[in-house]
Image (cartoon, helix red, strand yellow):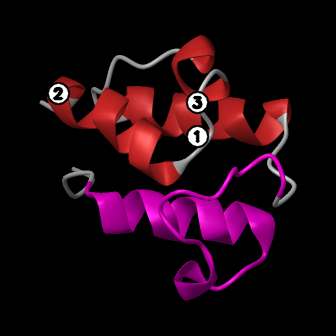
Amino acid sequence: MPEKLTLEAVREQVAELLYEEPSELTDDEDLIDWGLDSVRIMTLVEKWRKQGVQVTFADLAERPTLTDWWKVLEPKIT
């Protein structure tokens, strides 16, 4: 069973997709500016759905910062 999703886990997963160090990504930076595209967002959506988090592409694409994503994800974590 995958470990529980945390803000730091989200940061690490996003950084991995962007080939960056997690420490480089601040909570309020626009992840699109870092090169996050729709394919990578869908990769995250599918990964998190497999962990039981009911999130959609639109949830993430509309507000592409770690802070906003965590506001969406945290209440949905089972």
First-in-chain label (2 vs 1): 1
Name the residue at 27% across, 26% down.
52
Q: Nearer the viewer, residue 49 or 36?
A: 36
Does the residue at mark 3 contact the one at mark 1 (Cβ under 8 Å)? no
Q: CA distance from mark 3 to mark 1?
A: 14 Å
Q: Mark 2 sits on what residue?
A: 75
Q: Which residues are magenta?
A: 6-33
Which amino acid, mark 3? Arg
Q: Mark 1 sits on what residue?
A: 44
Residue 3 horizontal/vertical position (percent): 22, 58
Q: Quadrant of residue 8?
A: bottom left
Q: Quadrant of residue 64?
A: top right
Q: Mark 3 sits on what residue?
A: 63
Q: CA distance from mark 3 to mark 2?
A: 16 Å
Does the residue at mark 2 contact the one at mark 1 (Cβ under 8 Å)? no
Name the residue at 48% across, 51% down.
66
Q: Which mark is residue 2?
A: none
Residue 20 horizontal/vertical position (percent): 73, 80
Name the residue at 69% across, 50% down.
30
Against 64, residue 1 (above or below) is: below
Which amino acid, mark 1? Leu
